[in-house]
Amino acid sequence: MKTFIYILLLCVSTSFFAQKKASDYFKNPKTKVLVVGSFHFDYPNLDAHKTNKDDQIDVLSPKTAKEVTELVEYIKKFKPTKIAIEAWPSWNANQKLKEYSEGKHRDKRDERYQLAMRIAHDLTISELFSIDAESVLDDLEKQFGKKDSTFFKNLSRDYDFKSDDLISQEFTNFFRSSEPKNFKSLLDTFIYMNSKESHQYGYGAYLSGDFTLREHDGADMLALYWYSRNLRMFRNIQKIPHNSEDRILVIAGNGHAAVLRQLFTCSAEYDFIEFSSLK
């Protein structure tokens, strides 16, 4: 009889723990974060995907300027307390923000002015956090020298984002379809760009083409360069002083946003807010 009761209690106990969700173990309050993936408003065309001149929009034109205002008002619904931007410390974001508050830089097309500084100014946020980072590959090249290193030459050979296989062609068409000219408004563009599905394929773009170079060279280059850079950007966001009452707005290129979505979603420290949920 005692053996039967013991087995019964053991089964009930095992059943109880089996039904417990993984999330039940993480009860500490999380900091909300909204990642806004953007195209670069001033079109420097330094990324793998280049935007043709005919596909570019002018965010300072009267029509698009109104759409920028609509986008800014939409993002402000998140009510951020901290704002992080894709910028190097040497960009002197906070000096520029001070100048912006004095009426300067309003004619700059860069999204860091048109979105981040405008939102900071409207919400009386006096500090921007610059989160861009070099990769571990950059550090290794500085340490050992790229030009004189046979290892680096072999590793990076043909890694140039110029693949033309069938999947790469599909991604080219996908990125072209995401251009603002294909949407009713800039806000609609951002809702599409920042959707889970769009980020999924944006992330997947790095897992084809050059990723398949030789045995592991493409995979190693992705890890050492692109993924390392985004992990470091995430780490820079972690270093921003915050608590559960803070709401962190991150504005970065949409390629970064796709990776940051994965990192924030998996983190037990943050609560990732879907861009489309601000409606």
Image (cartoon, helix red, strand yellow):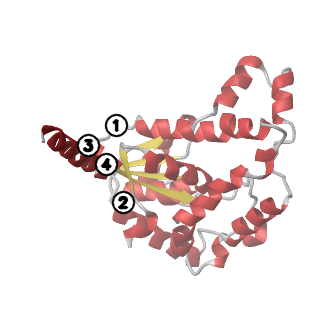
Label drawn at residue 96: none
Tell me whether the residue at label 3 lies in contact with that at label 2, contact meaning CB atoms closer than 8 angstroms: no
Q: Give above or below for 213 relative to 59.
A: above
Contact (Cβ within 8 Å) of mark 4 with mark 2: no
How far across and how far down the image is residue 127, in percent?
39, 43
Foreground: disc 1 or disc 4: 4
Give the residue number, with chain letter if any, for mark 1. Answer: 241
- Of all residues, the one furthest to the left in this rendering is 1
Marks 1 and 4 sit apart, C-alpha to C-alpha, by 37 Å
Identity of the amino acid at label 3? Asn
Return the residue at label 2: 122
Q: Position of residue 97 (x, y in %)?
A: 45, 47
Q: Nearer the viewer, mark 4 or mark 2?
A: 4
Using the numbered discs, state the Cα–Cα distance from disc 3 to disc 2 in whole angstroms.
Answer: 31 Å
User: Identity of the amino acid at label 1?
Assistant: Pro
Q: Quarter holding the C terminus?
A: bottom left
Q: Please tell me which of labels 2 and 1 falls first in the chain.
A: 2
Outermost residue on the bottom side: it is 184
**Which amino acid type is marked by label 4?**
Ala
Q: Which of the two labelled residues, at mark 3 and mark 4, occupies the earlier sequence position?
A: 4
Q: Which residue is mark 4?
A: 18
Of marks 2 and 1, the one in the foreground: 1
Give the mark nearer the N terminus: 1 vs 4.
4
Q: Secondary structure at mark 4?
A: helix
Disc 2: CA contacts within 10 A as few (<14), some (14-19) or many (>=20): few
Distance between mark 2 and mark 1 Cα atoms = 21 Å
Q: CA distance from mark 3 to mark 1?
A: 17 Å
Q: Residues within 10 Å of mark 1 (few under 14, many from 20)?
A: few
